[in-house]
Image (cartoon, coloured by chain):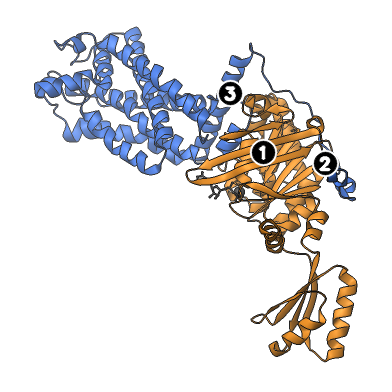
Chain colours: A blue, B orange
Amino acid sequence: MSTTRDMGRTSDAADVRGGGEVQGVSTVPGPGSKLGWAAADSWTMTRRELAHWARRPVQVVVGLVFPVMMLLMFGYLIGGGQGVDGDFKDYLVPGMLAMTMAFGLEATMLAVTQDLGKGVIDRFRSMPMASGAVLVGRSVADMLQSVVGLAVMIAVGYAIGWRWHEGFVPFLGAVGLLLLLRFAMLWIGIHLAMVAGKPEMVQAVQILVWPVGFLSNAIASPESMPSWLGAVVEWNPMSATATAVRGLFGNPGADGDSWAAQNAELLAVAWPVVLIAVFFPLAVKRFRDLSH
Amino acid sequence: MSDHDAAIVVEGLRKRYGAKQALDGLDLTVRAGTVQGILGPNGAGKTTAVRIMSTLLRPEEGRVEVAGIDVMTRAGEVRSRIGLLGQNAAVDEELGGRQNLEMFGRLYHLGARRAGARADELLARFGLEDTGGKPVGQYSGGMRRRLDLAASLIARPEVLFLDEPTTGLDPRGRTEVWNAVRSLVGGGTTVLLTTQYLEEADQLADRIAVIDHGKVIAEGTADQLKSRTGGDRIDVVLRDASQLARAAALLPGAAVTDEDRRMVSATVTDRMAALTRTVGALRAAGIEAEDVAVRRPTLDEVFMHLTKGDAA
Ligand SMILES: Nc1ncnc2c1ncn2[C@@H]1O[C@H](COP(=O)(O)OP(=O)(O)O)[C@@H](O)[C@H]1O
Ligand SMILES: [Mg+2]
């Protein structure tokens, strides 16, 4: 290379080079500001998702209406309740809330799978942004969607006759547990999207969540099931949340005899925390190593 | 060249996909402030090389320094000094042009106000200020490419990677992108540009590295490379294919005949002299020509020549 290096510039190169770029934006964070930047980057990514939603209002509305339809279907069409004492709507609504939160897994997985296929992800990865920001931003956006979704479900539940009986603070506690479950499921969804990120896999998961969803006490009491099945159902994270939430709302179905039923509130916290502790770092690492 | 004035240093880069050796010992040094062309056919390893240099991919072997920084161990620092225009559009297709640029500006930590101002500045510079909130998915190919280019310039990069910036564009889009690239070199930015077109490398690059099967097979200025292939070509298309042999004898050097196209071609050194001499000789011999043209060697010819040289 050295022999020809002085011939490197063509004679007209100097003319071709017009007005230029000034350099010198330093974007390497000091250790103290790293966390702040990670938060700022994540919020930018959340705003990106909100901007997407602003451009697809129909999809957003459908996303909110679907769980409501499910609630109405189970409440009126299938209604009756499998082995449930007391008012079925008081049993059903908390179960449907837990199920909606858990099924958020597939919505998140689908969104991440689609997003990862886009060219813009390469740009994000070539920029000096916090490595988990794309995912954290997604999780915050999905949580905002879930808050709205939960509010709609609760309003519809109220309209069809469901009531809570334990006052405001337990009510908030129940909402908190539901959102915690959503948050845990969301990170499983993100991780699955990155492990198996193909549209076919999303379809498989969309089908598989149904048996997992029904292997819970969301719409039927475990006491109406064979005992081995009842045991599986009681240890389902979704069941723990549903039972704990029923207790906090003062709804029926929170007074089982098993250890899992008696400690539903503990499990409703522990399950999501463990799931988040496992899947959050796995997902962020996967994203960082993407295509390496 | 010492590594000191080099903006990019690549040594012994190897990357494999399954059984396919995409990069097979790639070496390259790019001087700061110059435009380096990487010329190679589809599958030569251009994109793989760019993705490694821009921190998106890790090689199995080799070393890469960009702006004096090792891309494997200090990727974060490299990222704040580079801009990347990937082979495929890397902008958010659902958002508008300004929304995209502002978002990237925030991610470069310009702050909300400066990100907005920088977005407006770049939109104006690339002629995209009238696009409003129209989603990028509805842009023409050339517009999208210019927005993509604008996005890679937000943080005023020291080193800019352009991976096949005009592939898939119509001639107008290509001219737009060429003009945009020309307007931005000169402030000390080093540009590495990959292309399949000799003409593009010729137009934009100071130096060209020709790569094939994951390694550099020739390096130099456009003129140096072309003279290695034996210079320009003259193509003569005849009315009557039966006269091809006679016409071939009139052309300088070894002529190649193509019966189907009724064409005979030869290498020439002096374009104008060769043209006038050939036209005169054909007329004198009473051979009727439909077309006579002098042209630059094609990439195919450069390749044929270079790979022939390797084999010898
Ligand atoms: N993700 C991948 N998986 C498998 N093979 C790949 C992948 N990316 C590139 N290749 C192969 O590596 C070689 C080099 O590809 P690439 O760098 O894209 O070449 P270019 O950009 O010059 O067209 C090609 O043979 C291509 O098929
Ligand atoms: Mg390529």
To which residue does mark 1 refer? B84
Above or below for A227 versus B185? above
Query: Which image quadrant is residue B11 in?
Result: top right
Q: Chain of mark 3?
A: A
Is A161 situated left or right of B132 in this image? Answer: left
SS at mark 2 in the image: helix
Above or below for B139 versus A109? below
- Amino acid of disc 2: Ser
Residue lying at 70% horizontally and 29% vertically, measured from the top left: B115
Contact, mark 2 vs mark 1 (Cβ under 8 Å): no
Instruction: Answer whether residue B208 is visible to the viewer in this image.
Output: yes
Give the quarter of the figure containing the C terminus of chain B.
bottom right
- Amino acid of disc 3: Ala
To which residue does mark 3 refer? A130
Task: Please provide percent x and percent y for residue A90.
Answer: 21, 20
Looking at the rendered image, the disc whose residue lies closer to the viewer, 3 or 2, is 2
SS at mark 1 in the image: strand
